Amino acid sequence: MKCTQNNDANGPTVSAYGLYADAAGTKNAFANFTTTFKIQDCPGGKASPGNWWHTADPNTILGQIACGIYKDNEPQVMWSNEQTFVFALIAGQPQGPDLDALYQWWAKHS
């Protein structure tokens, strides 16, 4: 599913979500999509790609996250949830939101 600009301040200009049959499919989607952009550390020095979890339960890893730049100027954050079998991606434009803003939006809504 692909969505366009939302109404949140500094929210993504585009987002895409895919539902997979199992955790293996979700992992493969994440691995394949991370080859499409230039990987950078996520804001705050977070590993990219790296594991992610809900703050309330840091002992349960839900999947992976990666941050980077697509086509040399489009910031993106992508992640997988291996419990719900979802792969998702959010993106900005060169004029914004930037990678920091996208990551903050993701952290608030993940």
Image (cartoon, rainbow, N blue to C red):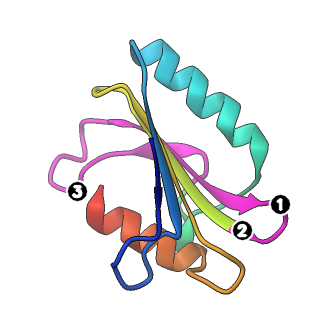
Say what secondary structure mark 1 lies in.
Answer: loop
Q: Which is nearer the eye, 98 or 6?
A: 6
Q: In this view, does 20 lie above or below 3?
A: above
Magenta residues, as a range? 47-74
Relative to 41, 5 lies left or right: left
- Count how many numbered circles sit on residues in the image: 3
Residue 36, picture quadrant: top right
Relative to 65, 107 lies left or right: left
Q: Do the residues labelled 3 and 2 touch (CB within 8 Å)?
A: no
- CA separation in Å, label 3 and label 2: 27 Å
**Residue type pointed to by label 3:** Thr
Nearest to viewer (mark 3 / mark 2): 2
Residue at horizontal 67 percent and vertical 37 percent from the top: 33
Tell me, for residue 74, which label it has, or none.
Answer: 2
Quarter that holds the C terminus:
bottom left
Circle 3 sits on which residue? 55
- CA separation in Å, label 1 and label 3: 32 Å
Q: Please tell me which of labels 1 and 3 falls first in the chain.
A: 3
Q: Do the residues labelled 1 and 3 touch (CB within 8 Å)?
A: no
Say what secondary structure mark 3 lies in.
Answer: loop
Q: Which is nearer the eye, 12 or 75?
A: 12
Categorize mark 1 by other alpha carbons within 10 Å: few (<14), some (14-19), many (20+). few
Nearest to viewer (mark 1 / mark 3): 1
Q: Please tell me which of labels 3 and 2 falls first in the chain.
A: 3
Tell me, for residue 71, which label it has, or none.
Answer: 1
> x and y percent of residue 48 in the render?
61, 51
**Residue type pointed to by label 1:** Lys
Q: Do the residues labelled 1 and 2 touch (CB within 8 Å)?
A: yes
Q: Which is nearer the eye, 64 or 93?
A: 93
